[in-house]
Amino acid sequence: MLQQHYLCGGRRQDAVSGAVFAVNDPATGAQITSVPNAGEPDAVAAIDAAEQALPSWRALTGKERARTMRRWYNLLCEHADDLAVLISAEEGKPLAEAHGEVDYGLSFVEWFAEEAKRVDGNVLQSPQSDKRLLALKQPIGICASITPWNFPMAMITRKVAPALAAGCTIVVKPAEQTPLTALAIGELALRAEIPGGVLNILTADAANSVTIGKVLTSDPRVAHLSFTGSTEVGRILMRQCASTIKKVALELGGHAPFIVFDDADLDKAVEGALTAKYRNAGQACIAPNRFYVQAGIHDRFVARIAERSAALRVGNGFDRGINVGPLIDTHAVAKVRQHVDDATRQGAQVVAGGCAGEGNFFQPTVLTGVTREMVISREETFGPVIAVARFETEAEALALANHREYGLAAYLYTRDLARAWRVAEGLEFGMVGINAGAISNEVAPFGGVKQSGLGREGSKYGIDEYLEVKYLCVGLQ
Ligand code: ADP
């Protein structure tokens, strides 16, 4: 499954320039392989290919597209072990977690293959007796997708599967750190006989990603851009899309709060916190970045979470029994260190971990006495740090939790049903876990409010992103 060519128009290709760039293992720093460094002419060729493929792909019935996607799904299932190895190798997460990501990524292909058959319009009740009114749903056209490194498979299938199901064609630009999983997914699409040009995957380094981004966001033939990544880059891409009025779907930064009330089930709250925070070493946009714990349960929660964090094994994701893998690169380690140092300088206490290991590893860390002035309370850490602040009242917790900028995911733990509803309804976030630390699945609408993004992925709503509603007014003679 290790591919060294990008995918364009159903062909495995080198970059027009012949350039390549290295893909490294974040656990060891060793080079795994190199892949083509696509640039502007490659991006134009990929859009050409998507344009050529569109009429015949769009013309298929939903049922025919569903069958083709099902072949792809079956091949992805057959190669699940290979995909998990690629994910661990280029992204670093422990192999067991990589298998979890493969299952999660597969679920979108299965779900949207099924949804392809259920794209229905409406017959509307006409206010005039001599007219019949209809709303049809049609594919939006050529789509572009720019994806991040933290979930190298799932972030691609969550976008590509609904696009293909809707009858769109797509050009994907995976993150420069993790192109290998993307290329394997593309190779299996080719073997599944998804027609050439329907799915195109361009690999590029950081500098060329910016160039390709400019082509994808400015070409008038591209109707839709879907992006998952930082809020900062989301802003740039949205601005670039403005000149040709593209529809945009953005999944951006999160900075999730995790609220534990005095009446919470302590065991469940601890398990939920560990699951939500340490998955992928904290490198997830829905990972909690701020833990607000009520005074009556605070010390017990901190003691348990510190003990459990200290017991986690950090290391190469391929080694047996590893719970937390490396961070993606040295910049990520520096950022986590900066957040921890800033917090301790301003009075936070380290009750577990607190320091980096060799290379890109960082010890699971628990901080207490965190205040809203600290950088960690405002900016995404994207690392294995549990930053705890104590609160007294429900109103105080809600006010602390509602962030000025971010509104992706939030979590709360309580056994009081009325409080659960009150707080969940008051949280200004797109997704809320109530006594649940693992909230993502293909059935759920994933997405944020405020500057955490636009649109929803997965679920019965996710395909709407790739459809336009066309109104027909039929006059009766
Ligand atoms: P992170 O900080 O998590 O790496 P980014 O938002 O920087 O997230 O990157 C997410 C994706 O966006 C990657 O595929 C990256 O190559 C791409 N990207 C980053 N900057 C730009 C840009 N200016 N134009 C287009 N794509 C970009």
Image (cartoon, helix red, strand yellow):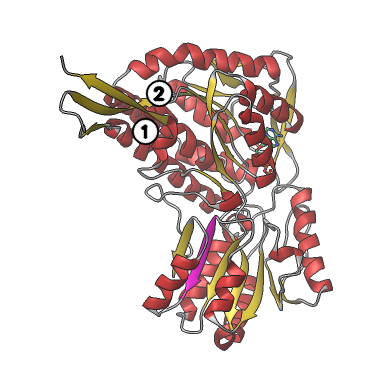
Q: Quadrant of ligand 1?
A: top right
Q: Nearer the viewer, residue 195 or 247?
A: 247
Query: Callout 2, which amino acid?
Result: Ala
Left or right relative to 189: residue 250: right
Query: Callout 1, which amino acid?
Result: Asn
Q: Could one spot residue 475 in this view of the protein?
A: yes
Q: Secondary structure at mark 2?
A: loop
Residue 15 is inside the magenta segment: no
Q: Residue at x 76, y 30 (%)?
A: 207
Q: Could one spot residue 356 in this view of the protein?
A: no
Residue 410 is inside the magenta segment: yes
How far across and how far down the image is residue 190, in percent? 46, 21
Q: Residue at x 64, y 27 (%)?
A: 203
Q: CA distance from mark 2 to mark 1?
A: 9 Å
Pointer 2 with pointer 1, Cβ within 8 A: yes
Q: Give the magenta part as a residue range.
A: 408-413
The residue that disc 1 covers is: 74
Q: Say above or below: 306 vs 3.
A: below
In which quadrant is the N terminus drawn? Answer: top right
Left or right relative to 63: residue 149: right
Q: Nearer the viewer, residue 458 or 19?
A: 458
Q: Residue at x 33, y 24 (%)?
A: 65
Q: Secondary structure at mark 1?
A: helix
Is the residue marked 2 within 8 Å of ligand 1, measured from its CB?
no
The residue that disc 2 covers is: 192
